[in-house]
């Protein structure tokens, strides 16, 4: 137990946790159900290429989100690349810098220039005013990101897109099973991209999908994820290999059944953090109480300027105790290669991104965390702050 700063592992005490606590520890459904699917796959000898489990998985995602088409893919990054290409984006596309680097890489990989726009410092979401400032004659699209599962300002971004004739899509990698203005995320923009990576609220080991209500766009993406094949021997479109395999769909079907349990655990953890952090000086928990359905997958704390400890001092203290807290998404895409070299002055237009990226700590949550563990995680930060205060 940590009662004084001297009890902290950074001062040589035994770490509070013998095993590491990770952000993004996978949430998993019923093991026996998964094994049954695995057996069926063996019996069927159908492993990939639009197999029966992938098709069932797509129909279940469509039903869950109330969206017309789910096109399942091998991961979220390929899903982004295919969506971007299917929409015909080219030239410059406006994205936030404060996101996982895949959002920018998916553009740069196909010779499209990501133009970084600043965020709202309170919500961490793309700022519509900042987007307007970055539009040039070469701009063809906007990719909004529903960071931490909170919806980007979809209406304002749609207005901008309509006004300037731009394509609008969303990176909804964090926002599976979240709602916005009474609609499930997945129904906004021309299409939305989901990630089912192991660390996500809902996982298929690796995986992703594009969801859309546009029939033609869905048809194009189905061709693109399978080399452009429209039947044996007949290639009718440029394409790549973005297919989801059967074993991943099996994991998805199992984990879909566990969604309510995972949200319950996440919500409980979020409330435990909120209560424990209430009296800790200088720490602000980002609110996930949107008043609508939410997955509570990320516990995001901002270390304010009034906090006696810096963000990195807190991270170091936590990691010494085997709490693998993360600095997502520091230092911002514009400070990562190749963007840092390509756009050395991008930071001048991104003041809020710089501040937020330097303040955020993401803490472990999910099915493997409980209230006692959370109390200890917060106590570590409290003691470090007390020591430096
Ligand atoms: N757009 C956005 C906004 C995204 O956040 C992401 C992915 C994407 C697009 C792209 O989607 P995908 O192509 O990935 O489907 C992780 C994930 O790899 C990445 O999927 C995710 N965002 C990002 C936010 O987090 P890293 O580099 O932080 O991963 P890593 O290896 O450090 O793992 C995170 C933590 O989870 C570690 O502490 C270990 C733990 N972990 C990880 C795995 C894989 C486990 O406990 N078990 C596991 O199986 O990127």
Image: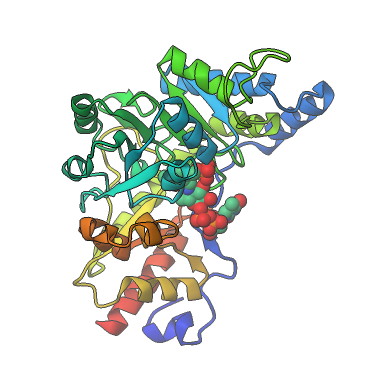
- Residue 27 visible in this rendered orientation of the protein: yes
Q: Quadrant of the C terminus?
A: bottom left
Whole-percent x and y of residue 134?
A: 22, 44
Instruction: Pick whichever, 316 or 226, lies toward us.
Output: 226
Q: Is residue 264 above or below residue 25?
A: above
Q: Is residue 65 above or below residue 334?
A: above
Instruction: Pick whichever, 179 or 30, lies toward us.
Output: 179
Whole-percent x and y of residue 89?
A: 39, 31
Instruction: Pick whichever, 352 or 131, lies toward us.
Output: 131
Q: Quadrant of residue 284?
A: bottom left
* Relative to 344, 71 lies left or right: right
* Relative to 358, 223 lies left or right: right
Looking at the picture, the colour scheme in use is rainbow
Residue at position x 57%, y 31% in the image: 73
Query: Residue furthest toward the front?
Result: 137
* Relative to 101, 179 lies left or right: left
- Residue 366 visible in this rendered orientation of the protein: no
Residue at position x 38%, y 44% in the image: 113
Whole-percent x and y of residue 309?
A: 29, 76
Residue at position x 36%, y 76% in the image: 313
Number of numbered discs overlaid on the protein picture: 0
* Relative to 3, 351 lies left or right: left
Whole-percent x and y of residue 193?
A: 44, 33
Q: Is residue 2 above or below residue 250?
A: below
């Amino acid at each position: 137990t940590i009662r004084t700063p001297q009890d902290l592992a950074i001062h040589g005490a035994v770490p509070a946790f013998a095993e590491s606590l990770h952000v993004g520890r996978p949430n998993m459904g019923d093991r026996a159900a998964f094994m049954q699917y695995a057996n069926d796959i063996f019996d069927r000898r159908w492993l990939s290429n639009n197999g029966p489990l992938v098709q069932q998985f797509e129909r279940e995602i469509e039903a869950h989100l109330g969206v017309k088409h789910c096109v399942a893919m091998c991961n979220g990054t390929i899903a982004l690349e295919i969506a971007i290409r299917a929409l015909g984006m080219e030239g410059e596309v406006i994205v936030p810098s404060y996101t996982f680097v895949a959002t920018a890489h998916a553009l740069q990989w196909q010779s499209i220039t990501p133009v970084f726009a600043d965020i709202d410092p309170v919500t961490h979401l793309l700022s519509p005013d900042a987007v307007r400032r970055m539009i040039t004659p070469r701009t063809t699209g906007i990719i909004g990101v529903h960071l931490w599962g909170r919806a980007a300002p979809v209406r304002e971004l749609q207005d901008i897109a309509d006004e300037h004739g731009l394509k609008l899509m969303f990176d909804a990698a964090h926002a599976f099973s979240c709602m916005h203005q009474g609609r499930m995320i997945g129904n906004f923009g021309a299409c939305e991209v989901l990630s089912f990576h192991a660390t996500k609220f809902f996982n298929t080991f690796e995986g992703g999908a594009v969801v859309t209500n546009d029939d033609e766009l869905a048809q194009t993406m189905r061709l693109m994820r399978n080399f452009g094949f429209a039947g044996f021997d007949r290639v009718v479109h440029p394409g790549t290999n973005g297919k989801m395999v059967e074993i991943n769909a099996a994991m998805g079907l199992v984990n879909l059944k566990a969604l309510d349990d995972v949200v319950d655990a996440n919500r409980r953890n979020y409330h435990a953090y909120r209560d424990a952090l209430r009296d800790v000086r200088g720490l602000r928990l980002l609110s996930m109480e949107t008043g609508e359905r939410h997955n509570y997958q990320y516990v995001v704390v901002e270390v304010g300027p009034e906090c006696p400890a810096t963000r990195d001092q807190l991270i170091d203290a936590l990691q010494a105790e085997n709490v693998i807290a993360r600095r997502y998404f520091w230092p911002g895409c514009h400070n990562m290669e190749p963007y840092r070299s390509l756009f050395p002055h991008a930071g001048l237009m991104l003041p809020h991104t710089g501040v937020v990226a330097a303040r955020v700590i993401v803490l472990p949550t999910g099915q493997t965390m409980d209230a006692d563990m959370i109390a200890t995680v917060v106590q570590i930060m409290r003691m470090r702050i007390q020591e430096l205060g």
